[in-house]
Image (spheres, rainbow, N blue to C red):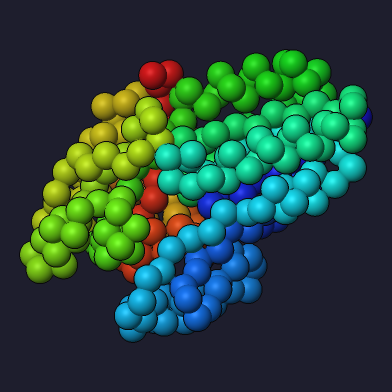
């Protein structure tokens, strides 16, 4: 059995050691330029360009053929996508699955709609690695991954909401309030994979405290935590320190947002994926 794990680039993961893994890039786009979400894209230059750009900007999901290419010649494929509430990536992956199976009759393919973005996908990828290495059957792998996805959650703290407002993910009024009053928006990905604002915090310390409070509220008890920041390692480290104060042995890892997540989190933002209760 040749097994491959595939994720779109909203996971902020391009490479994994010890498993067959492929990242499928999304893009940040304007009328004049495209920024593929791949290793080597200059995130700082992208954000600087977008800050000065006066036209519309947005994101573009992978084409069905991009997914088919990523599947390669594997006969067992475990794939995860950004939330279908924010992108058509899941839909195109499902079309790719149908097309791939038409020419690979015996292939087994699981496509997971993460209902999230960023670090929560990293957790799901790690679970996929575990079930592959355990040598489980496809049915068992699918069951274990699906069950695990019910216990992973996403929170975020955002300093700038301009790109979200331009793409109608938050109201322009909320973006202006955040900019004028220095408010950090703390929110989560809800059960439908849409953004839900939970707190409007004054300053980063309050935002970090609010995030940790929400983590505990939804069953965090020392499990894995994955943090992705956009040019703000201090806020990620502050949350890591808060977690380790209560759970010294907690597995907490910090990474930088790549292009897609940097577009939505914007400079100063933090995305959090963590293990909690099955809700």
Q: Nearer the viewer, residue 147 or 30?
A: 30
What residue do we see at 66% from left, 35% from top?
A: 94
Q: Position of residue 61 (x, y in %)?
A: 57, 54
Q: Position of residue 71 (x, y in %)?
A: 79, 44
What residue do we see at 36% from left, 81% from top?
A: 53
* Count of labels in the image: 0
Residue 160 appearing in the image: yes
Q: Nearer the viewer, residue 43 or 52?
A: 52
- In the rendered view, does 21 fall on the left or right side of 105? left
Q: Nearer the viewer, residue 73 or 239?
A: 73
What residue do we see at 53% from left, 78% from top?
A: 33
- In the rendered view, does 226 fall on the left or right side of 137? left
Q: Position of residue 244 (x, y in %)?
A: 37, 42
Work out which quarter of the rendered image holds the C terminus and state it. Answer: top left
- In the rendered view, does 203 fall on the left or right side of 133? left
Q: Nearer the viewer, residue 266 or 49?
A: 49
- Residue 44 found in image quarter: bottom left
Q: Position of residue 165 (x, y in %)?
A: 27, 59
Residue 220 appearing in the image: no
- In the rendered view, does 89 fall on the left or right side of 15? left
- Residue 274 found in image quarter: top left
Work out which quarter of the rendered image holds the N terminus and state it. Answer: top right
In the image, is residue 139 above or below residue 169? above
What residue do we see at 25% from left, 51% from top?
A: 170
In the image, is residue 92 above or below residue 173? above
């Amino acid at each position: 059995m040749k097994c491959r794990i595939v994720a779109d680039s909203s996971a902020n993961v391009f490479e994994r050691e010890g498993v067959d893994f492929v990242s499928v890039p999304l893009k940040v786009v304007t009328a004049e330029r495209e920024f593929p979400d791949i290793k080597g894209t200059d995130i700082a230059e992208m954000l600087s360009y977008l800050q000065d750009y006066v036209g519309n900007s947005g994101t573009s999901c992978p084409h069905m053929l991009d997914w088919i290419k990523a599947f390669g010649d594997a006969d067992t494929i475990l794939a995860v996508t950004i939330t279908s509430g924010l992108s058509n990536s899941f839909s195109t992956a499902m079309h790719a699955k149908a097309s791939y199976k038409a020419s690979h009759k015996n292939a087994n393919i699981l496509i997971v709609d993460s209902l999230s973005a960023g670090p929560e996908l990293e957790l799901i990828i790690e679970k996929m690695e575990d079930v592959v290495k355990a040598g489980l059957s496809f049915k068992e792998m699918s069951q274990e991954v699906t069950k695990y996805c019910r216990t992973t959650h996403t929170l975020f703290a955002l300093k700038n909401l301009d790109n979200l407002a331009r793409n109608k993910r938050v109201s322009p009024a909320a973006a202006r309030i955040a900019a004028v009053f220095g408010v950090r928006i703390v929110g989560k990905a809800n059960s439908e994979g849409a953004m839900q604002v939970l707190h409007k915090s004054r300053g980063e310390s309050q935002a970090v405290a609010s995030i940790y409070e929400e983590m505990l509220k939804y069953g965090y008890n020392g499990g894995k935590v994955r943090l992705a920041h956009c040019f703000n390692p201090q806020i990620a480290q502050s949350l890591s320190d808060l977690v380790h104060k209560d759970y010294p042995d907690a597995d907490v890892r910090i990474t930088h947002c790549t292009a897609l997540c940097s577009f939505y989190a914007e400079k100063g933002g933090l995305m959090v994926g963590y293990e909690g209760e099955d809700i």
